[in-house]
Amino acid sequence: MRHQISYRKLSRQRHHYKALMRNLAQALFEHERIQTTLPKAKEMRRFVEKIITLGKRGGLHNRRLASALMANQVMHFEDKKVDILTKVFGELAKRYENRSGGYTRIYRLARERAGDAADMALIELVDAPEAKIFKTTEPVEEKTKATKTKKSKATKSEPKEAASA
């Protein structure tokens, strides 16, 4: 029985588990949507939401607690290098100031991983701008069907008359 067990081990030792959570959280904060296995996504949700809550509270003490969890890694954000905690305590804290939890969303994917048939999931930050998720820099325009213009019979017959003369 699994009574009073607080986290999924994910078949890893504790130090490797912490490193995995840090790296997955960094990727999520950088890209705002990532694809991983379902158990990792469910476990990462707990980790990420704690860090965002610390970011919402603000202050030096909470920044140091978040730094201890995340190891303050550097990411590329809007074509410049920014540490993760700057984004968490700045942009994400403002985005989620009126939301009391539930900062992530998990979608189960219909397909399984090819190598070992593991259940796959997509985890994303809620209320993320679509431009950041889908990496679009320009607004998407709807494609319209191009109408084909038929050449008149007169234009087809003119080259033949010129060739016969």
Image: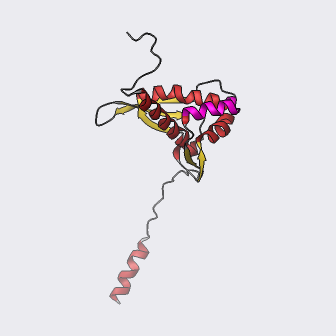
Establish if 30 lies above or below 20: below
The residue drawn where x is 42% and y is 32% is 16
Residue 102 percent coordinates (x, y): 58, 25
Establish if 130 lies above or below 148: above
Establish if 138 lies above or below 126: below
Q: Nearer the viewer, residue 32 or 15?
A: 15
Residue 146 percent coordinates (x, y): 48, 58
Quarter location, residue 155: bottom left
**Which residues lie in the magenta part?**
56-69
From the viewer's perspective, is 108 left or right of 58?
A: left
Residue 39 on the magenta span: no
Q: Is residue 96 visible?
A: no
Color style of the picture: secondary structure
The single residue placed furthest to the bottom in the displayed view is 165
- The N terminus - image quarter: top left
Q: Is residue 7 visible?
A: yes
- The C terminus - image quarter: bottom left
Residue 28 percent coordinates (x, y): 52, 38
The single residue placed furthest to the left in the displayed view is 115
- Provide the major secondary structure of the magenta segment: helix
Please give the count of numbered marks on the rendered protein: 0
The residue drawn where x is 68% and y is 30% is 61
The residue drawn where x is 41% and y is 72% is 153
Residue 77 percent coordinates (x, y): 58, 48
Quarter location, residue 115: top left
